[in-house]
Image: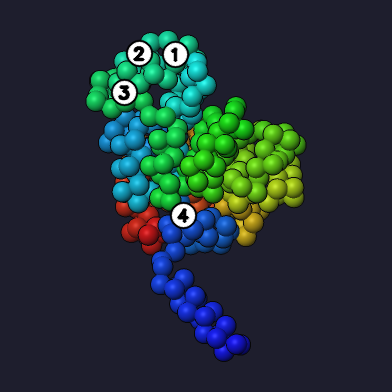
Amino acid sequence: MKKILTTLFILFATVLCAFPQSRIDTLLQKLHNPTVNYVFVAAHRGDWRYAPENSLPAIENAIKMGVDIVELDVQRTKDGQFILMHDPTLDRTTTGKGEIADWTLDSIQTLHLKNGCAIKTKEKVPTLEEALLLMKGRILVNLDKADRYFDEVHALLEKTGTTKQIIMKGSKPVEEVKSQFGKYLDKVIYMPIVNLDKENAEKQIERFINDLHPVAFELLFVDDVLPLPKQMKLQLAGKSLIWYNTLWDTMAGGHDDDMSLENPDAGYGYLIDTLGAKMIQTDRPAYLMAYLRKRGLHD
């Protein structure tokens, strides 16, 4: 009997090994390794240079490109349905006008999305559920603005089987995070956002490390004269990864996408080498990934 059980166990293990590890599991392993030699790429609102921001094609192209994380924005309609959209109004990104909260989902679905030049496209406003199903098992997801109604959003994550892919971020102090998200902190990834220009920044980071042990911090600072960003590289080494945004200059001391277009070593390279960034959110994911691959920092 013992020989039979041993044989069955070996066969079972062999079958498991025959299936490659999923991309999400691989990304999560890296995310939970504070010494990983890898830089995560987060696409801001999807690949919006390819398709309208927060649209399904923008998400799909980011996935095909090899992006690790897609950042998306969540809004709620008049009838309590969740859609992807950054603004609380429809005017900038759709052919409609007015507050999203004043429109029902079926009415919003008659509209068309606009591209970055404010030109009407054939694309429609996606629901959060549609987006989650598209991304299931394929990419990590940072849901922005979803904390306002996270109980309902979490139910949707459970329904779609995408809970472990979700990254939530926020700038609230640790006590409020534990109060609001406490029952979810073992199910979704939470990353604190800390403005290093504020007086209590170091204490805030210390509290989070002691109380919640976050896998990463998003850090913000306006100018290189501030010494704290360099200190954070040392302070967080071996504890948490560091996330920087390169969307515009005041988010990472001027080392943004624009600087990186002229000199990627002075932009992205500075954040990685001098400040210890292991996660970068960008509006130019293809350009950033090409740079990282040359340096052996991205698959």
**In the image, residue 46 lies at what x, y percent?**
38, 37
- Report if the CB atoms under discs 2 and 4 are less than 8 Å apart: no
**In the image, residue 223 lies at what x, y percent?**
53, 36
Residue at 65 percent across and 42 percent down: it is 184
- Report if the CB atoms under discs 1 and 2 are less than 8 Å apart: yes
Tell me the amino acid under the disc marked 2: Gly
- Report if the CB atoms under discs 1 and 3 are less than 8 Å apart: no
Q: Is residue 21 visible?
A: yes
Q: Neighbour class for label 1 at 10 Å: few (<14), some, many (≥20)?
A: some
The CA distance from mark 2 to mark 4 is 36 Å
Question: What residue would you read off at disc 2?
Answer: 96
Q: Earlier in the sequence, mark 3 or mark 2?
A: 2
Identify the image quadrant of the C terminus.
Answer: bottom left
Label of residue 24 in the image:
4
Question: What residue would you read off at disc 3?
Answer: 113
The CA distance from mark 1 to mark 3 is 15 Å
Question: What residue would you read off at disc 1?
Answer: 103
Q: Is residue 43 visible?
A: no
The CA distance from mark 4 to mark 1 is 35 Å
Say which quarter of the image contains residue 4.
Answer: bottom right
Identify the image quadrant of the N terminus.
Answer: bottom right
